[in-house]
Every structure is written in structure tokens, then in C-alpha cells.
Amino acid sequence: MAAEYSKGRNLISATKLNYFHYFLKQLSGYSLHPRIKLPSSEPARIADLGTQTAIWPITLADDPTLSIQVDGFDLSPNFFPPAPWRPNNVELHVHDIYTPFNEGFLGKFHVVHLRLFLTLSSEKVSAILRNAMTLLKPGGYIQWTEHDKTNITPTAAYMGQSAEAAQAFIDLQKEPFPGYDPLWVNGIASAMTENGLQVAAEDRIRVRASMLPQMNELHLISLMDVQPGLSKAIDDFRDKYMEKLKEEYSNGVSTIDGFITVVGQKPSN
């Protein structure tokens, strides 16, 4: 069920993915974490695992200050933009990131990027990291960003406003389907260490007030993106609270969410 939950629904899914990209870039101020040092002697090779719409590699590839080649990998090409619309320095590949990569990719990349997998067990985190590390050159980096749902709090622009639906949505995010554990994001850094990476950064960013309207919109799009029948908890929430949540949001109620980015570096020798 977790895998189906994260797949989404075509146009709505693509809109959500692209919106999240620009939201996170504005929130954090970067696409590549500033602790990541790219080589100056050669073009940097960067891999994006779970690339989906390829918005992250395309944005990075369009940066005129960077000399890079970006390869995006995803299980399905459904969200890939047409080849003629991609920058020349972006290549997209259909590949299951849990399976070994082709030999031609091994040890070739300076950076591997992962983002918004949303629903992973600790075993899958380690499996992804081990496979991602095979792509890295010595001294290369893994950057991983996730939605941190462990400390979401309601907020209101004005005193005395009802946040009943917003609180119900916070409760929903703790368990949108049976067996979901929002605490898994806290284990990314330790999983990197256990798999031989040196943690170079572990940043936690709270959504600032100026971006709460966009966070509200992303919450609503995310609720729309889950197919009926996939999660009873989400279906029940939409039936009982969806219209109330829209009303609260339009009146200046929101939730202060967090995001976490962890950067790990492969030893140079």
C-alpha cells in the first residue's frame, strides 16, 4: 500500500511534484546543498534517483554557473518530459533503484540525489543507500531530502480561529495508512553512517510564515492525489474534513511543517 500511495494520479501527481520542487528550492535556498563541493577540473556527474518529472535535474542542468551532466533514474517513464524538451546535459533512464545499476554507471558520479520518497522502512532506506553508493566516486556525496512529519503544529493568522480540520489533518499524517511510521526520516543520517558514509550535514527546516499559503496548497493537492479506496483513513478524512480544511486554510489557518536534508560523503579512499 505504501508504494501505491506514493505513485499518485498522473496530472495531479505531476503538478504536486513540480510544485514541491519549487517550494523546497525557495524554502531551503538551494538545489544542491552548500556543503557539496563539485570538481573544478571536470564536469560534475550527478544522478537523481526517483526522478519522476525530472524537474530537479532539469533545473540544475539549466544553471549556467554549473558544468554538469545529470542522469535521472525512475522505475517508470510516465512522467518523463519528451526528449526534445530536455536540456542536452540531462539523460533519463528507466531503472528500479533497488536493483544493481549497469556497470557503465558504477563509480562515475560526484553526487547522488534522493528526495520525497515519503514512505520507506529502515530496511529500504539502507537498501537504497547501498545501491546509490555504488554510483559514487570516492569522495562523492549523497543528498537526501524528506518531508519531516514528526513535529507538525497548527497555526493561525488571527486569534480565536478554529483549527479543528487542520489538527485532524496533522493526526492523519501520522498514520495515513496502517503501518506507516513518520519517524523513519530520523534514521536517514544513522543509516548513512552504518553504510560507510560520513554525515556532512543534517538540516531541519521549518516552513516560515511567508510560505504557509503554498504549504496549504500542497497539502490539498496531496490529498487530491490519493486514489479513493487506497487509504480508508484518507477517504474518511476527505469525507469529514476536506471542505472544512479548505475553509480554514482560506481564513488564515495552516500547519507548520518541517523538512529534513541529510548529506553523506563517501570516503576518499
Image (cartoon, rainbow, N blue to C red):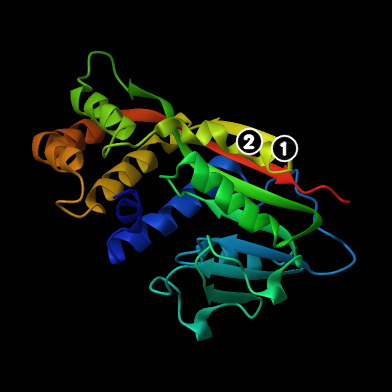
Image spot of residue 72 (x, y percent) = 57, 68
Image spot of residue 135 (x, y percent) = 70, 62
Q: How many marks?
A: 2
Residue 217 visible, this angle: yes
Could you tell me how far apart the alpha carbons at marks 2 and 1 are, in whole angstroms?
7 Å
Disc 2 designates what residue?
Answer: 189
Q: Residue at x 51, y 81 (%)?
A: 85
Could you classify mark 1 by the number of other residues whose Cα lies within 10 Å: few (under 14), some (14-19), or many (20 or more)? some
Could you classify mark 2 by the number of other residues whose Cα lies within 10 Å: few (under 14), some (14-19), or many (20 or more)? many
- Which sits in the foreground, 255 or 178? 178
Residue 62 visible, this angle: no
Q: Secondary structure at mark 2?
A: helix
Q: Residue at x 51, y 63 (%)?
A: 51
The picture quadrant where one finds residue 166 is top left
For the residue marked with disc 1, what is the amino acid? Val
Question: Which mark, residue 199?
Answer: 1
- Which sits in the foreground, 133 or 143? 133
Q: Earlier in the sequence, mark 2 or mark 1?
A: 2
Do labels 2 and 1 touch, CB within 8 Å?
yes
Judged left or right of residue 70, residue 115 is: left
Q: Residue at x 12, y 38 (%)?
A: 236
Rendered position, 183 above or below 161? below
Judged left or right of residue 89, residue 40 is: right
Question: Which mark, residue 134?
Answer: none
- Which sits in the foreground, 269 or 212? 269
Q: Residue at x 33, y 30 (%)?
A: 174
Image spot of residue 226 (x, y percent) = 24, 52
For the residue marked with disc 2, what is the amino acid? Ala
